Image: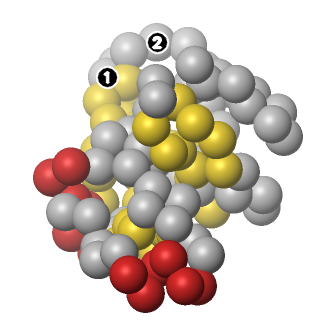
Amino acid sequence: MLGGFSVKLGQFSISIRHKITNKIITSKKAFWPVQAYAFGKRAKRILILDVTESGEYEVIFNNPKSVKVKKSNLLILSLIYSFISTDKLEVIITKKLGTYPNLT
């Protein structure tokens, strides 16, 4: 998720559907929600998709309005910042990157 470090998912999730087999893979919450910077923006790995079959997939965003993101997860700064509009958030889908991803 691009936009901030403090992420509250609510009922938000991501699924992908294989275009030929119609198999649906649903995201799981990351055990280690790693913070990083990607493309000059704050980013946080919060969901993981385990894709075992190659092919073309359709991305499905479930309950996108329920996700809440603030720029900072530090208590003092999170009191100052308001939630970022969901229209301003971006999602990056990458291969497995390890504990300290470099997304630049």
Q: Is residue 79 above or below residue 74?
A: below
Q: Which mark is residue 55?
A: 2
Q: How many marks overall?
A: 2
Counting from the top left corner in percent of width and height, residue 71 is at 43, 62
Which picture quadrant has residue 79? bottom left
Dot 1 amino acid type: Lys
Location of residue 13 with respect to 22 vertically, above or below: below
Give x and y (percent) for residue 43: 52, 45
Residue at 73 percent of width and 31 percent of height = 101
SS state under label 2: loop
- Where residue 70 appears, x then y in whole percent? 40, 68
Q: Nearer the viewer, residue 54 or 45?
A: 45
Q: Quadrant of residue 96?
A: top right
**Vertical placement of 16 versus 7: above or below?**
above
Marks 1 and 2, how far apart in space? Answer: 8 Å
Tell me the quarter of the image containing the C terminus. Answer: top right
The answer to whether residue 24 of the structure is visible from this angle is no
The answer to which of 92 and 100 lies nearer the viewer is 100
Residue holding disc 1: 19
